[in-house]
Amino acid sequence: MNFRCCGYHHYGEYLDYIKLLVAAVTQTAQRPFCSAPAAAGRRRMHDKRCTSLKSVMRDQIVALIENEGVTHFITGMALGVDMYAAEIVLDLKSKYPHITLESAIPCETQAIKWSVASRERYYNIAAKCDKETMLQREYTPDCMDKRNRYMVDHADYILAVWNGCPSGTGNTVRYAHKKGKSIIVINPVSLDVTRE
């Protein structure tokens, strides 16, 4: 089973767009977990709201593993929620050694303009992934959308951190609906979880 998560939220004076695609795979069907870009500075990573969001994400990922038999996850390797999800899955591998993590990279230069600390975090996560899927070598205006569609196409479940406003995350959720995927939405402000 596959899972996708995406979202958009406001923390303090900062407006963060958060998209996370998580695709979970059963032991019999290899399907990924995906996530898409989000802007979140390092100083906000330990913000109480980020910590709470990560806890809810972790609970949903554990439920996918334990209740739905998900064994394979895909991350879009974007800043913010994507990386949160990847780090959660990597941490959970100690308790669930059978799960795997795939990085779905939209283009080779995805992290090139990021800060040194963000790039180091990106490459550290990438080195721990069980599989890497590079969707294309060069950047194009639609490469992030291609990555998001790849994740949805290879997922049974979509986990979205999303406030419902029009955005790339919204486009991805609509695409997942068209594809008949099970969608779990975490509201980034209230942390309410809904299933569609």
Image: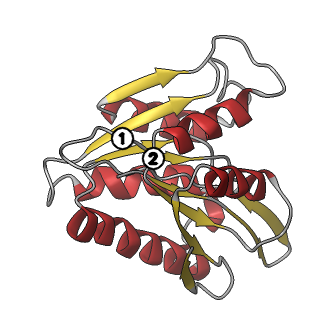
Q: Residue 155 shows which numbered tag? A: 2
Say if 179 sits above or below 195 in the image.
above
Q: Position of residue 135 (x, y in %)?
A: 58, 20
Q: Earlier in the sequence, mark 2 or mark 1?
A: 1
Q: Position of residue 72 (x, y in %)?
A: 30, 45
Say if 113 sits above or below 83 in the image.
above
| Total tally of numbered discs in the picture | 2
Query: What residue is at 49 percent from the left and 57 percent from the top?
Result: 84
Q: Badge 1: few (under 14), some or many (20 or more) residues near its Cα, within 10 Å?
A: many
Q: Name the residue type under label 1.
A: Arg
Q: CA distance from mark 2 to mark 1?
A: 5 Å
Q: Can you see residue 164?
A: yes
Q: Position of residue 168 (x, y in %)?
A: 78, 50
Q: Badge 2: few (under 14), some or many (20 or more) residues near its Cα, within 10 Å?
A: many
Query: What residue is at 45 percent from the left and 70 percent from the top?
Result: 57
Quarter of image, res 74: top left
Q: Which residue is mark 1?
A: 31
Q: Name the residue type under label 2.
A: Ala
- Circle 1 — which element? loop
Is 94 situated left or right of 157 in this image? left
Is 30 situated left or right of 120 in this image? left
Quarter that holds the C terminus: bottom right
Q: Are marks 2 and 1 in contact (CB under 8 Å)?
A: yes
Q: Can you see residue 41?
A: no
